[in-house]
Image: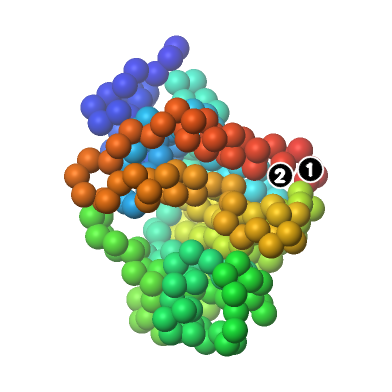
Amino acid sequence: MAGTESTGGATAINGWKHVYSGKVRDLYESEDPALDHLILVVASDRVSAFDTVLEPAITGKGKHLTALTNWWFDRLGVPNHLSHDVSVPAEVAGRATVAKKLEMFPIECVVRGYISGSGWKDYQATGSICGVELPAGLTFGGKLPEPIFTPAYKAPLGEHDENIDFAKVIELIGEANAIALRNLSLSVFKKASGLAEHAGLILADTKFEFGIDPANGQITLGDEVLTPDSSRFWSKAAWDRGERKDSFDKQIVRNWLAENWNQVGQPPALPAEIVAQTADKYAELVDRLTSEVA
C-alpha cells in the first residue's frame, strides 16, 4: 500500500514509529521489542541549502541517495550499518534502509582530495584547513598533494557544525578512536576515488560518519555514504578543461538561492527548471557510477 503522510511530513509506516526527522531523512523505530536494535532510515525528496529546507522537493532524490549508498556499501569492504534482519517496508521501498543502531561518534569525518567549498575559504584565510598546513599557491579546484582529513564536530540539534583540528578529535573521542577514524576515512576515500575514476569522475571531497556497533564493539560506517548530498563529484573531462564549479549535487540549488534570497525570512520556491536540473544531476551521477563501474 502507499504510505500516508503523518505529522511533519514523514510517511506513516505500519509496524514502525516515527521518532525523528532531519532536513532530508526520517527515522523510525520498530514497534516489535525484539527489533529494538534496528532503525529504519528513510531518505525523503526534501532538499536543503543554507541550513534551510526548501520547496518544492527534488523528485526521485530519496531513491537516488538510497540506491547509491547501498551500491557503495557493497564495494567499500568496511563494516557498515546495514541490517538484513527484516525487509524494508513496502511503503518506503527503494528509498529506505533497515540499519543497526550505532553509538555514533560526534565527528564528521571529512576528507578532501581537491580544494573547494569551505576548504578553499579556510585556505585563502589561513593557508591551512582544520589545522592541516598546505603548500602556498594552490588554486580553486586544484588537486591536493595527497588527500587530507579535515574533521568537523557535529553540533547539537539547532547549532552549526564546527570545523576542528585533529587534536580536538583526540580530546573528544580519545586517541585510539581518532586515529582509527582518520585511517578508515582516508582508506575509504582512496578506494572510492579509484572507483569514481573508472566512471570518468573525480571525487573532490566527502564526509563519513562512524559509530560503534554495540553487538561487537566494532567501528562501523553509518549514515549515507558517497552520495551527492555528502560528496562533491566532478566530471574528469570537465576538470581537465579547467572547469571547476559544475558538480553532481545540489550546487545548482545553492547558486540559484544565493542569487535570489538574502537568507532573511522564508526562502522563495525553487523554479521548476532548477528542480528538474537538480534531479537530472542526481540521476546522472547514479547512472554513471552504477552502469560504468562493475
Residue at horizontal 33 percent and vertical 64 percent from the top: 161
In this picture, residue 291 sits left or right of residue 24 = right
Q: Quadrant of the C terminus?
A: top right
Q: Say which amino acid is labelled 2.
A: Leu
Q: Say which amino acid is labelled 1.
A: Glu
Mark 1 and mark 2 residues within 8 Å of each other at the beta carbon: yes
Residue position for label 1? 292
Residue 167 visible in the picture: yes
Q: Quadrant of the N terminus?
A: top left
Outermost residue to the top: 1
Residue at horizontal 64 percent and vertical 76 percent from the top: 144
Image coords of residue 180 (percent x, y): 54, 74
Packing grade of label 2 (10 A; few <14, some 14-19, many >=20) is: many
Secondary element under disc 2, as helix, strand or loop, is helix
Q: How is the image coloured?
A: rainbow
Image coords of residue 167 (percent x, y): 41, 84
Q: Is residue 287 above or below residue 2?
A: below
Outermost residue to the front: 259
Tell me where residue 84 sits by quadrant.
top right
Tell me where residue 102 sits by quadrant.
bottom left
Q: Nearer the viewer, residue 216 or 236?
A: 236
Image coords of residue 70 (percent x, y): 61, 42
Q: Nearer the viewer, residue 219 or 228?
A: 228
Packing grade of label 1 (10 A; few <14, some 14-19, many >=20) is: few
Residue at horizontal 76 percent and vertical 38 percent from the top: 291
Q: Which mark is residue 289?
A: 2
Q: Nearer the viewer, residue 112 or 211?
A: 112
Q: Is residue 257 above or below residue 197?
A: above
